Image (tube, rainbow, N blue to C red):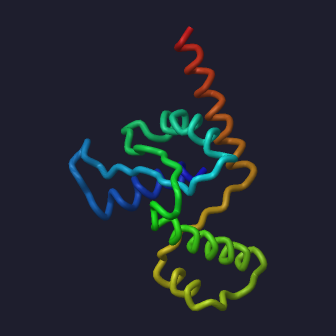
Amino acid sequence: MFFVNFMKYLTEDIDRRFPRKSGREEGVDFVFDRQQQFAPLALRNYELIKKIIDPKNRFGALVYDSKERHIPLQAADLLAFYARRILTHQNEGKPWQDPLERMLEERHNLMLSYFTREHMEIFAKKIVARREATRDDAI
């Protein structure tokens, strides 16, 4: 669901703010913190996700590496911490107390998304349909 939302942001916000000639749209590589549990599954499914939501091939490499080599991952951890707090506050109806939370909200510098079970089921059905179509093409 991250990639679905990111493609929407890329095509609806970034493309509008920074227009380029067709075929020269902004591309994106993804670097995630190195970990063992989900990386193999994510890497296997990345190409399938790209086929579903990225017909112009704007998503580039998907890499898992260390926070020590990719310092921006440390900043991403901080934003993830605040995103979790903000969503928790919203769900519990609590006001935001932290000055950084208020600044992020006022400046609209942090995008938060919440996916319901229904959103996940719809996306899963698309993935299954795409896998079946790919399998049929190979036969």
Q: Farthest top residue?
A: 139
Residue toward you, 18 or 34: 34
Vertical arrangement, residue 39 with respect to residue 106, above or below: above
Q: Position of residue 132 (x, y in %)?
A: 62, 21
Q: Farthest front residue?
A: 68
Identified at 36% across, 39% down, the residue is 56
Vertical arrangement, residue 54 with respect to residue 19, above or below: above
Q: Quadrant of the C terminus?
A: top right
Task: State the count of labels.
Answer: 0
Vertical arrangement, residue 112 with respect to residue 138, above or below: below
Q: In the drawing, does residue 41 fall left or right of residue 57? A: right
Residue toward you, 7 or 80: 80
Identified at 53% across, 50% down, the residue is 64
Vertical arrangement, residue 118 with respect to residue 113, above or below: above
Q: Farthest left residue?
A: 21
Residue toward you, 31 or 12: 31
Identified at 41% across, 57% down, the residue is 12
Residue toward you, 118 or 56: 56
- Image quadrant where residue 84 sits: bottom right
Q: Position of residue 97 (x, y in %)?
A: 66, 91
Q: Position of residue 89 (x, y in %)?
A: 72, 79
Identified at 64% across, 41% down, the residue is 123
Q: Position of residue 51 (x, y in %)?
A: 49, 33
- Image quadrant where residue 134 sits: top right
Q: In the drawing, does residue 61 fall left or right of residue 90? A: left
